[in-house]
Image: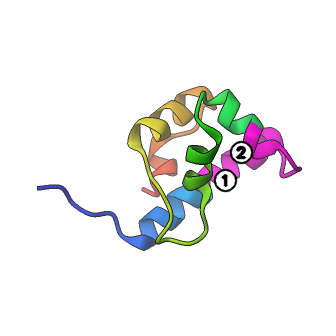
Amino acid sequence: MKKRMSAKTKNLICSRVRKVRIDNFGDDFGSKKEMARAMREDYNTYLGYEKEDPSQQQVNIEFIKRLSIKFNVQLSWLLGE
């Protein structure tokens, strides 16, 4: 049985994905596109990883793992542990 992720956990993960982007590309216009390109992710798909509205947030564990490796960020931190 698959366990659903709480809105609070999704929000925390999405905010940490956003922090990694800002730390590496800044918060200027176009930085989300740069991050999507760096992660080889469709831009619109990437936007779902940063959504502020929990009902629209997407969390993809494979993306989180790749993000952890590419930017040398602890997976446990990204996952809010």
Is label 2 in a helix, a strand or a loop?
helix
As drawn, the label of residue 18 is 1
Label 2 CA crowd tier, 10 Å (few <14, some 14–19, many 20+)? many
What crowding class fits label 1: few (fewer than 14 Cα within 10 Å), some (14-19), or many (20 or more)? many
Please state the horizontal and vertical placement of residue 23, each as a whole percent of the image.
77, 45
51 relative to 28 in the view: left or right: left
Residue 21 image label: 2
Give amino acid for label 1.
Arg
Q: Which residue is pictured at 69% across the width and 30% down the height?
A: 37
x and y percentages locating residue 2 in the rendered image: 18, 55
Q: Is 2 placed above or below 65 here?
A: below
The answer to whether residue 57 is magenta is: no
Q: In this view, does 9 lie above or below 40?
A: below
Dominant secondary structure, magenta: helix
- Tag 2: amino acid: Arg
Secondary structure of the residue carrying numbered label 1: helix
Report the span colored magenta: 16-33
User: For this view, does 40 lie left or right of residue 30?
Assistant: left
Q: Gap in Å between the C-alphas at discs 1 and 2? A: 5 Å
Q: Residue furthest left?
A: 1
Looking at the rendered image, the quarter that the C terminus falls into is: bottom left
Residue under the image location 61 percent in, 56 percent down: 50
